[in-house]
Structure formats: C-alpha cells, structure tokens
Image (spheres, helix red, strand yellow):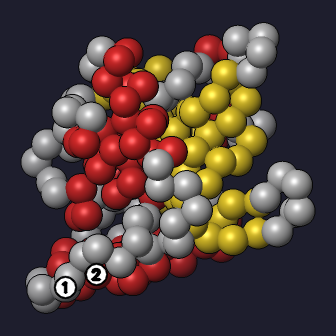
C-alpha cells in the first residue's frame, strides 16, 4: 500500500465507496455509473521536508484555525488511510500538473455545487436538460482544472458531467494503487 511519501502534487485520490453515504450514493446513482467510487481529492502541498501533507478538494472542509466546517473548495490534511483510495497520476508534464493545481487553488472558498450533482443526475439518468454553473462538485473541479491547464483527464465527457468513476478509469491517468 502507498504512503504519503509515495505521492506527489497532482496525484488524484479516488475514494472507494464506504459507509452510509456510499450506500446512499450507490442506490441513487448506481443505475448510470459505477458506484464503486464516491469522491475525488488531489494531492496539493509538500511540507518543508518534501512530504505530501495536504489535499485540495471540493467537499467538507475543516478550517484548521477555527475548526469551522463548510462545504466547498478547500484544503484538508492528507487522508491517513490511503488504502481506501485508488491513486492515479495524470500522464502529462509536471508543468501542466502545477498549472492545474494553481487553477484549483484559484477557486478556494467557493461553495460546493450540490445543485450541479442534481443536474448531472438529471442529464445522465433522466435525460433531461439541466443547466450547469452552480458551483463545483469534486470530479468536476478536478477535470475542469486540468482542462484549463490544457490536458483533458476525461476527454470523452464534459467536465460538468464527470464522475469519480471517470477519473478512476480514464486512460489519461496511470494507476499507482488500484
């Protein structure tokens, strides 16, 4: 199993489904995508010792100074149990990864795109048109940042229609840990 020392900024952590939320996700979206994966984080920061210690994500964020929790784009400590993640590395130049991380960081503090999750469900499951642009959700943020940096992680799907499964299976990333 990988440890934080094996990771580098830009690595994508695709969280495997677990717990009550994962079961709910499987029930709600299992018809239109593989519910094996529920969330995406990206390795973001190296500490002064050259070790990875932070991830950037769109989800539940805990402010390190106040302890306040919010849902949106933010930075969290790296998860301690990397065994519950499929770890993938984009097959692009390090400069592209750095550019994508800068793009992601430019969105820090934006609210979580809960409506966007509803919109993707309407588009994929019901075939209904649904607008996007209501904040990011996890896989959308990741795909969008790399697209802006010039590298499509999931080239056959628009960023606003991506899911963790797409990042777990895309041939534009290599698997470090299944």
Q: Residue, x 48% and y 28% (percent of image)?
A: 11
The N terminus lies in quadrant: top right
- At horizontal 19% and vertical 75% (from top left) the residue drawn is 124
User: Where 70 falls versus 176 (above or below)?
Assistant: below
Residue that label 2 marks: 119
- As drawn, which residue projects farthest toward the top? 49
The vertical placement of 108 against 20, above or below, is above
**Could you tell me which residue is drawn at 66 percent across and 64 percent down?**
60
Crowd band around label 2 with a 10 angstrom C-alpha radius: few (<14), some (14–19), many (20+): many
Q: Mark 1 vs mark 2: which is more N-terminal? A: 2
- Residue 111: percent from left, percent from top: 53, 72
Return the x and y of residue 39 as percentages of the image width and height. Answer: 51, 55
Residue lying furthest front: 106
Q: In 3D space, how far apart are the residues under numbered discs 1 and 2 (Cα atoms)?
A: 5 Å
Relative height, residue 6 to residue 104 (above, below): above
Mark carried by residue 130: 1
Residue 174 visible in rendering: no
- 88 relative position to 57: left or right: left
Answer yes or no: do the residues labelled 1 and 2 have beta carbons within 8 Å? yes
Q: Nearer the viewer, residue 171 or 34?
A: 171
Dot 2: what SS? helix
Where is residue 81, by image quadrant?
top right
**Residue nearer the viewer, 103 or 126:** 103
């Amino acid at each position: 199993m990988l440890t934080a020392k094996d990771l580098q900024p830009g690595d994508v952590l695709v969280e495997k489904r677990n717990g009550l939320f994962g079961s709910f996700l499987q029930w709600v979206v299992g018809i239109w995508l593989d519910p094996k994966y529920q969330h995406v984080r990206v390795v973001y920061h190296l500490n002064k010792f050259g070790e990875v210690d932070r991830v950037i994500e769109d989800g539940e964020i805990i402010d390190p100074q106040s302890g306040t929790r919010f849902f949106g784009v933010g930075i969290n400590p790296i998860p301690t149990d990397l065994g519950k993640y499929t770890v993938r590395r984009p097959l692009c130049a390090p400069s592209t990864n750095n550019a994508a991380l800068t793009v992601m960081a430019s969105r820090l503090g934006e609210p979580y795109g809960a409506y966007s999750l509803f919109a993707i469900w309407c588009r994929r499951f019901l075939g209904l048109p649904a607008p996007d642009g209501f904040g990011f959700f996890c896989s959308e943020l990741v795909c969008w940042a790399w697209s802006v940096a010039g590298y499509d992680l999931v080239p056959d799907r628009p960023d606003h229609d991506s899911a963790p499964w797409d990042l777990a299976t895309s041939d534009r990333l290599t698997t470090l840990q299944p």
